Amino acid sequence: MSSTASGTTSRRSGVWRNWAGNVTARPVREVTPASVEELSAAVREAAEDGLRVKAVGTGHSFTAAAATDGVLIRPQLLTGIRKIDRDVMTVTVEAGTPLKRLNVALAREGLSLTNMGDIMEQTVSGATSTGTHGTGRESASIAAQIKGLELVTADGSLLTCSEKGTDEERAVFAAARIGIGALGIVTAITFAVEPVFLLTAREEPMAFDRVLAEFDQLWAENEHFEFYWFPHTGNTNTKRNNRSAGPEKPVPQLNGWFEDEFLSNGVFQVAQWVGRAAPASIPAIAQISSRALSARTYTDIPYKVFTSPRRVRFVEMEYAVPREALVDTLRELKAMVDRSPLRVSFPVEVRTAPADDITLSTASGRDSAYVAVHMFKGTPYQGYFTAAERIFTAHEGRPHWGKVHTRDADYFSGVYPRFGEFTALRDRLDPDRRFQNDYLRRVLGS
């Protein structure tokens, strides 16, 4: 192992694994740069050695988007807030900063992102580059809250872009907010923020048929609406988050531990083990699980409402379908599960997002609904995911870039009107495919 002044380069090739354990890679070397200059030097050195380069965050993607047999960049020293600008209400943050640390740091400053996903283990660059999102009627993905980006391109130079730059910078900005690692290595992100606010969450069980019948109304009446359907049952758990004048009324500590840790993680983990060992028991377990959590209402700051601990490991596929196609999509998914021999122990998660203007965002140019299917780590998922994917693609679904799917560049050129814009920009920024890997070859073409 050699080390620079503060970063490190490991010449030994270890095996890299993602969080779910379904993707592995064996890079030639790993680099942990302590500055943007060290990162640029690592990219230039990789080019001299004829090696490809990929940056990895916390490995929360289920695809091989970050896998490489070349140089693996670990950004854990590129963390922290660079600048808070209260005049324009932005925060600039280093790319390797975990969302968890950003959320806590912003709250301490009396600030918050407008919307976020339901887990916060990812780095800011990993989450935005793959299109991580929460649910929202008007507020969109984390990437849609980006106001500026800085990235190291294939020749090692530093490129900054924003919506206010030159034509070229605006073109880069439109694409690089969700760049899947194809355009360069993100080093810093400037997010729009707002004064911290309160959300009141209302969680309650509801029949599957009722949720579908009232979906348009539930979506229209709530700033953030989502629900989980438990396969093999007609039951869902719904969650509505709306801004509140207060007072703050968090979940009591003991109740929170019991419901969010003991039931949603501990007991759920045991139920998954039982289901994996005895698949025939899954429908009965699903009936019990779908009734385990009772209704509750609480009020807290955004990240404490939007996010939840997720300790049970799984593999996931998620597609964005046009919002108007959601009810049909879910009815078809339920009918498929009901008539098949599949045994599905994980709930199906449903969220929404408004249309945005990011080139390869799953919500690019259309109001979208997300349907996420999961299987417990270590159980066969291919049969379920293949059948679900058939339904999603029939509705022109767009898969989450960081979650399991089988689509390729031909498919994407049909469901993304601006797909050619992205690939043309990639040709300009990375003509030698320094940031290429097998996944990008499949989804973007070579």
Image (cartoon, rainbow, N blue to C red):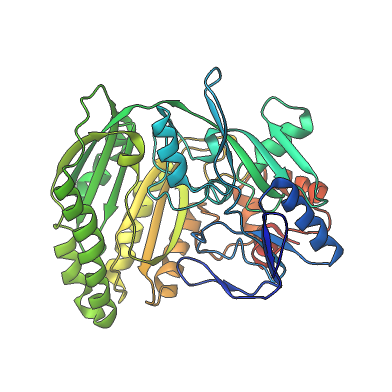
User: Residue 382, position in %: x, y?
Assistant: 44, 74
- The answer to which of 25 and 220 lies nearer the viewer is 25
Quadrant of the rendered image containing residue 283: bottom left
Task: Give the residue at the far bottom of this rendering.
Answer: 277
Q: Quadrant of residue 85?
A: top right
Q: Residue 340: x and y, percent?
A: 31, 73
Residue 410 placement (x, y as % from top left): 67, 59
Measuring from the top left, give residue 209's x and y in whole percent.
Answer: 22, 49
Relative to 134, residue 248 above or below: above
**264 and 417: which one is in front?**
264
- Furthest-top residue in this view: 87
Instruction: Residue at the far right: name it.
Output: 48
Quick check: 223 left or right of 200? right
**Image quarter hosting the C terminus:** bottom right
Residue 22, above or below 250: below
Q: Is residue 111 left or right of residue 444?
A: left
Q: Is residue 326 left or right of residue 273?
A: right
The quadrant of the image that shows the N terminus is: bottom right
Residue at position x 19%, y 41% from top? 251
Give the residue displayed 45% in from the left and 44% down from the top.
101
